Amino acid sequence: MKYAENILETIGNTPLVKLNVLTKDLPCLVLSKYETFNPGNSVKDRMALQMIADAEADGRLKPGGTIIEGTSGNTGMGLALAAIVKGYKCVFVMADKQSKEKIDILRAVGAEVVVCPTNVEPSDARSYYSVSKRLGEETPNSWYVNQYDNPSNCKAHFLSTGPEIWEQTEGKITHFVVGVGTGGTISGVGSYLKMKAREAGTTVKIWGIDTYGSVFKKYHETGVFDENEIYPYITEGIGEDILPLNVNFGVIDGFTKVTDKDAAIYTQRLAKEEGMFLGNSAGAAIKGLLQLKENFTKDDVVVVLFHDHGSRYVGKMFNDDWMQKNGFVE
Ligand code: PMP
């Protein structure tokens, strides 16, 4: 018989799937690393498992402990699955702009969810950064994960996502395109791919997808943390108003910003034109990839990573009233 010992053993080894329609005007092959095949329906299962394993190994997380994290949902899902299998409790802190589905899903897998206001400064005591940090300090036998600055986040992608992409493309990958939030995915995959390309005598360009309202692109280009770049936006999962330690700007060749409207429209187009029912950051990623068209040539192999599943956005980007209310459709 061939079976997994538990659900955590099914994390990783996701497929690489060719895009055929939205990319038809590009000269190159475009492949998507399809992370919704993970048991929590997102790439975040990988780093959740790694962060827990490393915290167990060095004693930060002890038997029967409580895992505390500020999460937009996907990291929470990965942590919750691992917590169930390994016998921990979970408390998650979320910003109120996140979809209701994400909150309901986390409660469905047994987590306690605390909801905080989105549009307050990170340093404000009500912000989800501050509340998760405070709960970490106040709760006995707890471990505050801090995915933004936790090196196990980036490490998970260096050890699993990166090697999978290198092997699946037989080392032929020339560009990697991915949305950036905590930076774990782009930095871990990016540094692994650049290391392998160096060894092979080839090159891989790493492109980050950012949102309007986030600091990453400007910081990468100028080295200046410009507060004028920060304003509310709708796109979920990518962009930040802080500089997480997990963003390794040194492995990133460039950023492109995608508007909320384009990200929402392309989330719908992936579903309707490619049969890929995915989350909002996948829409941003594919639109950003199309914006980078002039960088690609005939023999290039471009890999875009799609982070999560469409089911978490049925009340938003897949809802016509919501699209209209936000002025994203006529
Ligand atoms: N897309 C979605 C839907 C996410 O949840 C995240 C994580 N915040 C990202 C993209 C960005 O990934 P990372 O945190 O590894 O930069």
Image: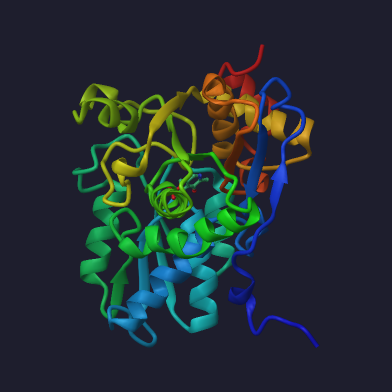
Identify the residue at horizontal 65%, vertical 59% (top origin): 14
Q: Residue at x 57, y 16 (%)?
A: 327
Q: Nearer the viewer, residue 197 or 290?
A: 197
Quadrant, the N terminus: bottom right
Task: Give the total of numbered labels.
Answer: 0
Q: Quadrant of residue 285?
A: top right
300 w.r.t. 197: above or below: above
| Screen quadrant of the C terminus | top right
Residue 309 against residue 5 in the figure, above or below? above
Rendering coords of residue 63 (x, y %):
37, 88
In this orientation, does residue 134 appear?
yes
315 left or right of 198 in image: right
Give left or right: position of 197 versus 17. Answer: left
Seen as rendered, the residue at the extreme top is: 330
Q: Nearer the viewer, residue 118 or 258?
A: 258
The x and y percentages for residue 323 are: 62, 24
Residue 111 appears in the rendering: no
